Amino acid sequence: MERSEMRRQVEKITSLPTLPGSVTRITTMLDNPQTTAVEVGKEISKDQVLSAKVLKLVNSGFYGFSQPISTIPHAMVLLGFNVVKTLVLSTSVLDMMAQSMAGLWQHSLACARTCSIVARHLEMEDPEEISVTGLLHDLGKVVLEEHMKEVFDQILSLVEEENMLFYRAEEEVMEVTHANVGGWLLDKWQLPSQLVEPIMYHHNFHPSRQHADRTAVIHLADILVRAEGFGSGVDSRIPELSMEAMDTLKLKAEDLQEIMDQMVEEMRDVAR
């Protein structure tokens, strides 16, 4: 399948996610710089199901808050508009992942937490935004499994038969990867480039891209989480670590060890 045809298929998807009127209103409010956290919180709270899902995600462990977050306005203050908007838009995708791809859900939670650890270690801006990109970095796999099942199964067969990395098998079958698919979906949702680009290129790192530092964080977190066996990225192989990504983050061996130790400790806490 050609790249352009694959993108057309992704953009034609209307049932993933389902966007009720409340979500449309909320995202419009979030795009307005004059909107306050209290106003958005009130609007989200009107939809009890959506409100519960967002709070469940906020409290699911990958942000590591010491106290539970019980209200949407509180979440808005702590996480910021972009993160809450992304969580609002992503609830149905993440529901599907949690229900039908449990290993991928665990992997995504661990990747989100690790992104936060790396971002804070490096004192990067907006670690919460970086964390949510870690949570969603594999959402393209959910799109493929739910909406292109035949293609997804073909990829899995190639992974097993040839002992290939999942994204390499994707390239063989459809000329693009789940990272492209996820990026296209986020672009369709009109999310900002600092969220879209790291997801789209986490398997194809290049230091010249605008958000190379964030992309490098997700690239590293994905590999560390796989190496430690937290959840499953669908395939069991570990991608090669890009030295350009490491150079971009300016991480030394001792930094990496410190990050890994913290990751293991925090994921142990989440699992309790």
Image: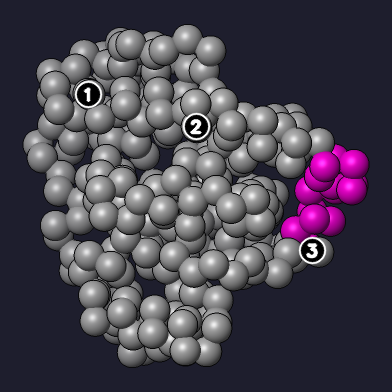
Bounds of the magenta segment: 244-257
- What secondary structure is found at the residue carrying circle 1? helix
Nearer mark to the viewer, of 2 and 1: 2
| Label of residue 51 in the image | 1
Query: From what the image shows, is residue 184 above or below residue 261?
Result: below
Q: Whole-percent x and y of residue 92? A: 22, 45
Provide the residue designation for mark 2: 271
Identified at 66% across, 56% down, the residue is: 227
Closer to the chain start, of discs 2 and 3, is 3
The answer to which quarter of the image holds residue 6 is bottom left
Q: Which residue lies at the image location 22% right of the left edge and 65% below the top edge?
A: 146
Q: CA distance from mark 2 to mark 3?
A: 32 Å
List the residue tagged with mark 3: 244
Report x, y in % for residue 239: 64, 68
Q: Name the side, left or right, on which 258 lies relative to 202.
A: right
Q: Residue at x 28, y 67 (%)?
A: 145
Find numbered disc 3 in the image and state the secondary structure of the residue it sits on: helix
| Residue type at tag 1 | Ser
Q: CA distance from mark 3 to mark 1?
A: 40 Å
In this view, the residue in front, 271 or 248, is: 271
